[in-house]
Amino acid sequence: MQVRKAVFPVAGLGTRFLPATKAMPKEMLPVVDKPLIQYAVEEALNAGISEIIFVTGRSKQAIEDHFDHFCELEHTLMARSKDALLKEITLLVPESGTFIYTRQNEPLGLGHAIWCARKIVGNEPFAVLLADDLMKSEKPVLKQMIERFESLQSSLVCVEEVDPTATASYGILDADPPKDRITRVRGLVEKPAPAEAPSNLAIIGRYILTPEIFDILERKETGAGGEIQITDAMARLLATQPIYGYRYEGERFDCGTKVGFQMANLSYALDRTDLRDRLLSFLRGTLNVCG
Ligand code: UTP
């Protein structure tokens, strides 16, 4: 089956980014001049996804507004002949009915947020993208995964090797090192202490899931941190279906953390011809001062 739908859970509280995220969704934080959520939505659309499903929560209105018309702004840009900007912001507005919003009434965990999309996804495989993992790559990471899914027809999680001391921040696979970027999963553990971690292969924010995951999430079992975890649900899914890990090609920025977010801004800004030279001379000067 084809992957046509992508779920964007955006109902988290973003506590690691307070106070910035008190009234503004974490997913609207801009990397250079584009919010994180736009990078992730563009990745999905460039991977051939045709239906975008947001699982939102309180104070996430800005995300809906970002992907809608803003008539006053459009008229002003038109009157001032700012055609390029006008084109850029109107291109963001999808055809009606292709972006769908549903609510997670309480932030009970990522697994619960995904479960909230069950009626919209229905009985077909679907992608999940966490916008705070910003993926920089030539071929969109989700496209890389969809291509692998086409032959495997099984759930697939995106993975990266992390520092073995950092396993308690991730869902970790029990699996051999990937060959040709793929590894078959023997088990999954959410946030294990380094001594208990079965590997250093960490799950990062891209998934392709089969719809049977919803039956498991329906049980609403809580795990690490008292939250309903997608990693635990996938560990249960393993009893009836194979799951694979996919080592993506590209670079990941963990924009859920302050340091990862700063790195992303630097990296994306240095790619821009309009920003690169001034930024480089500033960086060189600063590094000289720092010794
Ligand atoms: P995080 O683990 O980064 O949680 O969620 P968070 O609340 O966004 O941020 P911190 O840890 O408090 O700083 C990963 C993704 O899952 C979504 C988040 O919006 C983020 O995209 N999520 C998490 C939900 O949609 N609902 C939840 O209940 C939890």
Image (cartoon, rainbow, N blue to C red):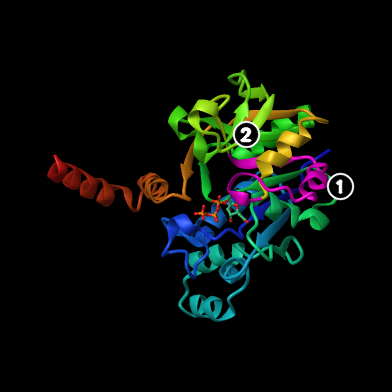
- Percent position of residue 114, x then y: 71, 52
Q: Is residue 272 above or below residue 56?
A: above
- Percent position of residue 193, x then y: 51, 33
- Percent position of residue 267, x then y: 39, 44
Residue identified by numbered label 1: 123
Badge 1 local density, few (<14 within 10 Å), some, or many (20+)?
few
Dot 2 amino acid type = Val
Image: magenta residue range: 204-227
User: In front: 80, or 29?
Assistant: 29
Question: Residue placed at 69% from the left, 24% from the top?
Answer: 186
Badge 2 local density, few (<14 within 10 Å), some, or many (20+)?
many
Dot 1 amino acid type = Asn
- Percent position of residue 177, x then y: 58, 19
Q: Which disc is residue 189 wearing?
A: 2
For residue 16, say whether it is visible.
yes
Magenta-drawn stretch contains 217: yes
User: In front: 198, or 60?
Assistant: 198
For residue 42, say whether it is visible.
no
Q: Is residue 188 above or below residue 56?
A: above
Quadrant of the image containing the C terminus? top left
